[in-house]
């Protein structure tokens, strides 16, 4: 399609010269004798280039330039000015005009200025289209990466769950103990106002808390009776073993410290480091409480599941010694039926 040029000048002779000049060069030309007529054309036609006289009766070329940039911002503009209007012409350049020519002018000068303005316009449009295309490609690639990351995260989660189920099965745990304590941990953490960005590490740590038991022999791990002192030394190593297994895995690194600390006690009598109070990561302090809930409310080879009242009594009894009192208070503020809904069974 031939680019259309709009020539705006109140002098008929000047309009005629410019029309003839651009028509001979192969352009499709339209003309307007004033600003109002020019605006009508701009709203109706797609104009590639407008040549605008600065001094016109009614509306000036400067006013028309302002309106043109609102109506058709992609239109290239060359201002036509008398010698004594050069400062105004320069001001028009700052307003978005591409060039100016001074009366009286010759045909070659008009064509050159028009061609340069059209080339600037072409480059602007080309750059904008490139940017839009680039943004579209970036958005598409970003979405692909996001989808891939989501799928990878799901694969990680499925792998972790499969590993944890195998660990639970090794200890003859029933009902997915690790999954339950993960659910309990996150519920209590939310109730305590833990920041959202800290929850994934707490959830992974709760899920993988017994990972280190993979390094404990079955003779010790599955022993039905009381462990000897030497056997306890070996059993206590599982927290460090679990930490060492996952600390080098980038997406699990934040969970490693919680796993290392999940047998620490609030009074400092726990293991492996004898941490005390808030030296113990909050995720580990939360986990210790909910692990007690799960241990007491599930059947064991040596006893039946205990009622919820026994759990609360134990938390009261060991408050300040084994358990962080603030975590205990937060746990007790949650009604029994809420914990039962998470467990999908009754604690009666």
Image (tube, grey):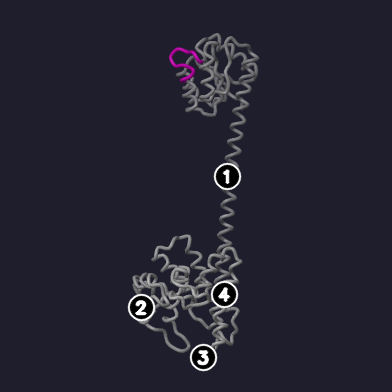
* Span of residues in magenta: 54-63
Mark 4 → mark 3, Cα distance in angstroms: 24 Å
Q: Residue at x 49, y 68 (%)?
A: 203
Can you tell which mark lies on residue 225? Answer: 3
Q: Residue at x 44, y 84 (%)?
A: 299
The reply to whether dot 1 and dot 2 touch (C-beta < 8 Å) is no
Instruction: Locate the C terminus and report the quarter of the image it occupies.
Output: bottom left
Q: Residue at x 61, y 16 (%)?
A: 110
Q: Residue furthest bottom?
A: 225
Mark 1 → mark 3, Cα distance in angstroms: 66 Å
Q: Residue at x 48, y 88 (%)?
A: 301
The reply to whether dot 4 and dot 3 touch (C-beta < 8 Å) is no
Q: Secondary structure at mark 2?
A: helix
Q: Secondary structure at mark 1?
A: helix
Label 1 belongs to which residue? 136
The foreground one among 44 and 334 is 334
Q: Earlier in the sequence, mark 1 or mark 2?
A: 1
Mark 4 → mark 2, Cα distance in angstroms: 29 Å
Residue 253 percent across, percent down from the top left: 56, 65
Q: Secondary structure at mark 3?
A: loop
Label 4 belongs to which residue? 240
The foreground one among 296 and 40 is 296
Mark 1 → mark 4, Cα distance in angstroms: 48 Å
Label 2 belongs to which residue? 316
Q: Is residue 347 visible in this depiction of the protein? A: no
**In front: label 1 or label 2:** 2
């Amino acid at each position: 399609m031939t680019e259309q040029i709009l020539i705006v000048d109140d002098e008929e002779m000047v309009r005629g010269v410019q029309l003839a000049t651009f028509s001979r060069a192969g352009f499709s030309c339209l003309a307007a004798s004033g600003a109002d007529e020019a605006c009508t054309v701009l709203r109706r036609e797609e104009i590639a280039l407008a040549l605008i006289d600065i001094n016109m009766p009614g509306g000036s070329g400067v006013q028309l330039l302002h309106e043109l940039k609102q109506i058709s911002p992609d239109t290239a503009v060359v201002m036509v000015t008398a010698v004594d209007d050069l400062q105004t012409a320069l001001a028009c350049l700052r307003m978005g005009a591409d060039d100016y020519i001074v009366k009286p002018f010759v045909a070659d000068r008009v064509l050159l200025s028009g061609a340069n303005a059209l080339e600037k316009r072409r480059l602007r449009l080309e750059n904008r289209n490139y940017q839009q295309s680039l943004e579209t490609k970036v958005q598409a690639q970003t979405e692909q990466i996001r989808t891939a990351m989501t799928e990878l995260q799901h694969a990680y989660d499925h792998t972790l769950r499969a590993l944890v189920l195998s660990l639970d099965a090794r200890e003859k745990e029933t009902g997915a103990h690790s999954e339950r304590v993960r659910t309990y941990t996150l519920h209590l953490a939310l109730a305590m106002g833990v920041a959202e960005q800290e929850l994934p590490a707490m959830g992974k740590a709760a899920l993988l808390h017994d990972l280190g038991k993979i390094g404990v022999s079955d003779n010790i791990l599955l022993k039905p009776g009381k462990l000897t002192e030497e056997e306890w030394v070996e059993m206590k190593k599982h927290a460090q073993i679990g930490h060492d297994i996952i600390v080098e895995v980038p997406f699990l690194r934040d969970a490693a410290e919680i796993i290392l600390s999940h047998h620490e006690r609030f009074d400092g009598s726990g293991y492996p480091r004898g941490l005390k109070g808030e030296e113990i990561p909050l995720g580990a302090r939360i986990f210790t409480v909910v692990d007690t809930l799960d241990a007491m409310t599930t059947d064991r080879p040596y006893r039946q599941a205990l009622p919820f009242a026994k759990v609360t009594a134990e938390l009261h009894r060991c408050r300040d010694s084994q358990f962080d009192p603030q975590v205990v208070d937060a746990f007790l503020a949650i009604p029994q039926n809420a914990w039962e809904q998470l467990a999908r069974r009754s604690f009666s």
